[in-house]
Image: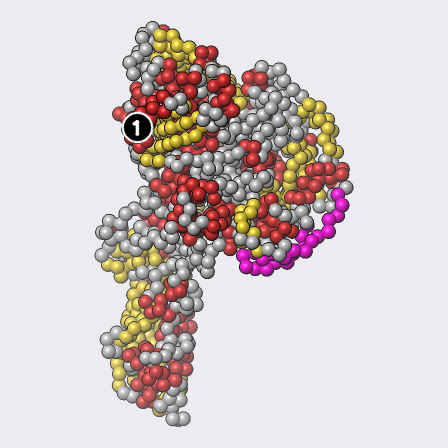
Amino acid sequence: MEMSFNGEFEVATPRADTFALLVDPQKFIPVLPTYHSMSMKPGDADTAIVKVRVGIGKVRGIATTEMTLSEREAPLRASYTGKGKVMGSAYTMTTAFELQDSAGGGTLVKWHGTGCVYGKILSLAGGGIRSYAEREIKQVIDSLRDALSSRRHFEAVAAAAQTRPQPQAGLIESIANFFRRLFGGPEPAAPAAAAPQPQAAVAAAPAAATAKGYKDPLIPFKDIPQRIDVDGDGGKPWVGQRLRRKEDVRLVRGRGLFVDDEQAADMLHLGFVRSPYAHARIVGIDVSAAEALPGVVCTLTGAQVAAQTQPFMQMGEAPGSNLIDYGIATDRARYQGEPVVAIVAASAREVEDAAELIEVEYEVLAPNVSSEQALADSSILHDEVGSNRIFHGTWDHGDVDRAFAEADHIVKIGRLHHHRFSSTPIETAGAVVKWSQQGDIDVLCNTGLPAIAAQMIAPFLGVSTEQIRMRSYDVGGNFGTKTVTYPFVALTALASRLVGGRAVKWIETRSENLASFQGGERTFTDTEVALDKDGVITALRSRHLDDCGAYTRYEPLGCSIWSQVYCAMYKLRNLHIDFTQVVSNKPPCTPNRGYSRSQHLWFMDRVLDICAHELDIPAEQMRLRNYIQPQQFPYTTPNGNIYDSGDYPQMLNKALDLIDYSAWKEKQAQWRGQGRWIGIGIGSTLDSGTNNFGQSVYINAGSVFSGNNEAARVKVDLDGSVVVMLGSVPQGQGHETVAAQVVADVLQISPDMVKVRTGFDSHWNTFAGLSGTIASQFVVTGLSAVKGAVDKLKAELVRLAVFALQAGEEQLQFGVGETGPEVRVQGQPERAINYWMLSNLANSNTSTTPEHLRDINLNVKHIYKPNFEPLDAERKYGNQTLTYAAQIHIAVVEIDRQTFQPRILDYVVVDDCGVAINPKIVAGQVHGATCHGIGAALQEAFQFDDNGNMITSTFTDYAPITSMNMPPLQCAAIETPSPFSYNGAKGCGEGGGAPLHTLSAAVQDALYGEGVIVSESHNSPSILMQAVNKPNRAELVSVQSRQAKPAA
Amino acid sequence: MLEAIQPVSIEVTVNGHNYRRDIEPRLLLVEFIREELGLTGTHIGCDTSYCGACTILLDGKPIKSCTALAVQADGCEVTTVEGLEGEQQLHPLQAAFSEHHGLQCGYCTPGMLISAYSLLQENPSPSREEICKGIAGNLCRCTGYQNIIKAVDAAAKGGN
């Protein structure tokens, strides 16, 4: 495209002086103002090299123009010819000046400029070029006139070495502006963001950040060297590196945004009056005094809720699914702490004032406190169910009877009990909900499973899921416990509607949290174990009774989930398990780290250790004989699960080495001789990740959920920024960081060039029906979605670059150039185009986009769906989970003979989470899961009196583990890559509850001599005192042997 | 019926800025900091002084601001997590927490940082046991404390 412009102006400067300045770049360059966005240096004698920064945000272009004095005839005429390249295109420009003496003693300057632009700039900048050029040429000429009119330049030349004049719009700056505006770039004052700056610009940047030695804390990854160019240097992939997290900077500065931090104009607060009884009929409610308080807007009883809503959907089958749940008691309270009246007031304090004035009359009913009590059905919680039994199913695989008939040893074990506890995130559950006048419901909350929550809330409120905008930002921990906050989020939404659409905030107190979300409790009875002569377990029979509390809010899903780890890490093929779930007058259960599997894995390790002790087989030998062997992977379990990969013997040997097992054994023998209670325990466990929701057919043959899915979106924004949106709900697992690592590797850029949006937002349209952060899955589901999306994005970038650079696809290379992320022709760095220009081509200059590229907008979504097949509900057979991370822990414990206080003397952890995407984050997950397990094993338990009063209703009573109770951990890892995930990773968020198994084993090892079999997962000093004072071995365990006991 | 409560006027210096407010006398200090001043870095995790998410410095001493009334801070100097960082530079403890992965969800982190800061003020080179004691009043549910201890140790030793 050719353009030409001309005109004339007059200046007061004599012709000779005007000419002298005009023709000598060496003279005028030093006195030109320096701008942040432009640099200029003298070239050869008559040449100036001008670099102009164009672009906005992080992605910039540099137009390099070589201006050469091509013609001079003193003092009559001079011409400059410029040619330059920008982002794979070229342009030439010529400006000719003719000088004449003017009537006033000055100079008349006639000018004529031509320009020609080649290549793909035309399609990028399109028809806007001429008008831009015209405007900019005018500015160039105007500023030149101003400059030549003044003697300032001549004076300044002499002083140039010492001083620099104040910036002003001069010739070169005008040229700079020309290009800047041509490409829609920033004004000169725009900040530089993270892109590298030309040297001269850096020198002149006002109060440059580095000049004072301070670092801008808002720029993450500042200490990590950026891999600017990976050409042939074998730059290490970002995946696998121990990167600091992108999330950290806002969080260490106290600038996260947690639900309770949210403020809205005219916001109201919701709180509950809760039942003081575990089981009681509501006889009457008087809210009149409360409603008369000035700050109170309204109250809402359960009956009023029920009149306006539909009960929450139930996941199970009838009759269990007949259970009616409104999230608030309607006619009967079924656990202590159940909401009975909701209060909406101007402040949380006024909610509390009102709560004191509400009078509820109750008729106390007989509570079902223990699971066994509930099973007896003497007092039924939900009349519509007709029984407290919510679920019953039988798992029967292999030939159990035959295995028992052929067994060399049969060990019978009495009641074992896995206790209630919770990982109690420090942030309680909450929501801020606004039901807008337009009918949309904006929900900011901290649930971990927003897509499922929306599917629960919408029918309750009688709206479409589409109307509900589910959002989260920072979430202060979850560990599964916030999975079922939906009843209270829904009630908050209802309240917002009732108060005319004002925003309503609901934030639990700690006591409310403890009384609302508890981890699962299970009792194991009638256990029979068949073993061969070597102590290899060949069959198992058992009866399991799960207690889900008063309502089935995620249940009875847990009745299926445990069977993901049916045979644990062991090779037995014959199992018969009779599984029942009951409701009781205790708070409803939620998933909690290791959900449902942890209980079963604890049971399996208990069985193994009890058999080992009874048959005199060392614990490590017992495991090595029973483990599934490395060459058996992928291993299909008796119920059709496919364990992806693993090497349990290697892990165990590593753990034994790490703790120096033989040395501890010697010490143990020596100390035992002194009468000390020393135990060494091994715990082996699995962390099954990436659920197949199809296992819901085990609890409901008509289930409409199956498989799994997760979404991610990656886009190049209008300014070239790379942005990622996730369908997951991060709660501390570093999703922003690991997603950026994956994207950075694909695009060959640095993770700090990747913006990952925080939290979840259904309005990003980046979620799938099962989206969320549960079940150790992000590293597989989330990252597979991210990888799929960035691969699609890269393919679009390639298609655009092939066109823009006129190069073959095979010639293209991705990387980071001087102007940020770019695509270039290999070996020809000048043939490059950055993301901003590519985005411009796709999104902002579309009239010149060729037909075959018009589908591209560099904003792509990918949904990952693992290959799961439907499960066989009848046989309870099929693959329930994609990956199986493993953990082996060993602990040395001493129990004080006076106080019965168990003390951990040494603790090692060996994990196999497959390929670690960020080993620092994996280690953090391992530490956290270990800490939860140790806390639960030794000090954390929800306890109830005979009336169902929870006697651990505050943190002070519940006593979560602190730094004083947490031993130093020695950790090691092996990596057996999963063949089922694209990256070889396995989900590792839950940890499988290993410390519960390990510490139970250690305590039993310490007290076996006292006749104690550990039958509780919780081993506090009081429980241990009872155990020693009333030894249970004789009563709990019996062994029938056809053979002599095997040799150790 | 509750009687109307007369507001009380207090003046508190928070992170170097002076604030004067008329408040309900029952307002907790943590509520004052979060709701009146909008400094939401200080968090609430329990109601019984157990978790320490609300830890702040009151005249240089660490306290749990969920168990103090705002009126008790009248005339005092308060430092919250927002006051830790230097001129556009993280405090070495903040940097060390990030470097050593001493935080995951970040909810306990502000209180933990304040307690660690206070510990290092009193004892610039604490042993592992002393660090554990120093942060014993602050719960963290994510990290198992391992990397927090490492981070405090690193900050005390002058590196990240």
Residue A152 drawn at (x, y percent) = 39, 84
Q: Where is residue A875 in the image (x, y as percent from the top left)?
A: 42, 17
Q: Can residue A636 be seen in this view?
A: no
Left or right, residue A254 beside residue A397 = right
With respect to residue A417, does A263 lie above or below? below
In depth, the one of B106 and A142 nearer the eye is B106
Q: Is the magenta stretch mostly helix, strand or loop?
A: strand
The answer to whether A322 is drawn above or below residue A758 in the figure is above
Residue at mark 1: chain: A
**Residue at the image position 30 percent from the left and 85 percent from the top:** A20
Disc 1 marks a residue whose amino acid type is Ala
Q: Is residue A421 shown to the viewer in this render?
A: yes
Residue at 35% in and 67% down: A202
x, y percentage for residue A128?
Answer: 41, 65
Residue B4, magenta (yes or no): yes
What span is in magenta?
B2-24
Residue shown at 31% from the left, 50% from the top: A748
Residue under pointer 1: A663
